[in-house]
Amino acid sequence: MEDGFIAPSINLYMEERRAPVDIFFRTLADSHGPRAVSVILSGTGANGSMGLKRVKEGGGAAYVQNPREAEFNEMPRNAIATELIDEVPTGSGDPRPHRCLPQ
């Protein structure tokens, strides 16, 4: 992040290549504190789970795709296992907002 915007950078270490979502969420949490929002969607492995912990520690919000609706459910299931998720919305088509975020 540079001045509140996403700034791409080269991954220099193998760990950075294995957990890009975690790195992004940690950076987002450090930059935006309680205004950070993490959203975990379909994917494999636990990528994102550690980063969403940092978002929650900073007072931000964490949402996860319902694993039953995900093409690959490992990332959503691992995120839910942290027990830090604010909501697992369903694809019910309900247009109402699920939660008001702090301003």
Image (tube, grey):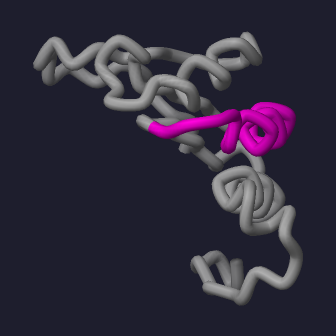
Residue 55, percent across and down? 75, 41
Instruction: In the rendered view, tell whether residue 82 sits above or below residue 21.
Output: above
Q: Nearer the viewer, residue 8 or 97?
A: 8
Q: Is residue 32 visible?
A: no
Residue 45 falls in image quadrant = top right
Residue 31, percent across and down? 76, 64
Please indicate whether residue 100 sits to the left or right of residue 13 in the image.
left
Residue 52, percent across and down? 72, 37
Residue 66 falls in image quadrant = top left
User: Which residue does the image show at 42% across and 30% down from the upper left?
Assistant: 72
The residue stretch that appears in magenta: 43-59
Instruction: In the rendered view, tell whether residue 61 sits above or below residue 32.
Output: above
Residue 58 magenta: yes
User: Which residue does the image show at 80% across and 67% down from the upper left?
Assistant: 16
Please indicate whether residue 46 sits to the left or right of residue 89 in the image.
right
The quarter of the picture where the N terminus appears is bottom right
Residue 48 magenta: yes
Q: Nearer the viewer, residue 41 or 44?
A: 44
Residue 30 falls in image quadrant = bottom right
Q: How many numbered dots are placed on residues in this image?
A: 0
